[in-house]
Amino acid sequence: MKKLNQETVANAVMNLVAVSVGVMVSDGLVAVIPDNEKQIGKLGIAGAGLAGVAMLPTKNTKGKILSGLALGASVKQAYNLVTDALKQGKTKDPEAGVAGKFIQGSIGLACANDGVWQGGQNTQSHLASPVMFPNNDVMVIEQEHQNINRDLSFMA
C-alpha cells in the first residue's frame, strides 16, 4: 500500500478528473449518434474504451490521463447498456422493501421522477418541462411578467 502524500493525492485527483471527463465525453458521443444506432454506439464506445485501457501505457502522465479517459468512457457506456436492458418494462415500486429499493436504485429507478422505462426513455420526465406551473401553462409566466411590469411602472 502506498503512503498518503502530496504526490499520491495528486495522482488520485488526476485519475478522478480523467475518468469523469471520459464519462462526460462518452455521453456527448452517444448524444450525437442517431437513435436507431445508440445501442451499437454504446457498445462500440465501451469496447474501444476497454481496448484503450488495456493497450495504453501508464508509465507517464499523458498515458495515465488517456487511460483514465478510456476507462471512464468504457465504464459509463457499459453501465448504460446494462441498466437499459434491466429497466425494460420495469416501474418503480414505492412499496418495495429494502432489497427491492436497493435493486431499483442499482438499475436507476430510485430517482424521484423515475417512471416507466421503455427502451431507455422515461415516459414521465419532468426535466424537459419549461415551467412547473399548474397545467404547464407558459401563459402564466407571460401574465405574471406583465403584472410585474405594471406594478413597477411607477419607478420609470
Image (spheres, rainbow, N blue to C red):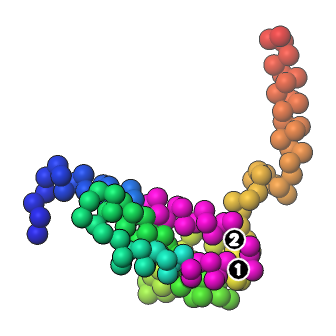
- Which label was assigned to residue 37? 1
Q: Secondary structure at mark 1?
A: helix
Quadrant of the image occupied by residue 52: bottom left
Going by the image, does 151 lie left or right of 79?
right
Residue 6, percent from left and from top: 17, 49
In the foreground, 143 or 89: 89
Identify which amino acid the numbered label 2 is placed on: Ile
From where the camera sits, is residue 25 visible? Answer: yes
Judged from the image, the secondary structure of the residue bearing numbered disc 2 is loop
Are dots 1 and 2 in contact, CB under 8 Å? yes
* Residue 139, placed above or below residue 54: above
Tell me: 50 left or right of 115: left
At a point 35% along the width and 71% down the height, the residue shown is 56
Q: Is residue 40 magenta?
A: yes
The residue range painted magenta reads 20-44
Q: Position of residue 145 (x, y in %)?
A: 84, 33
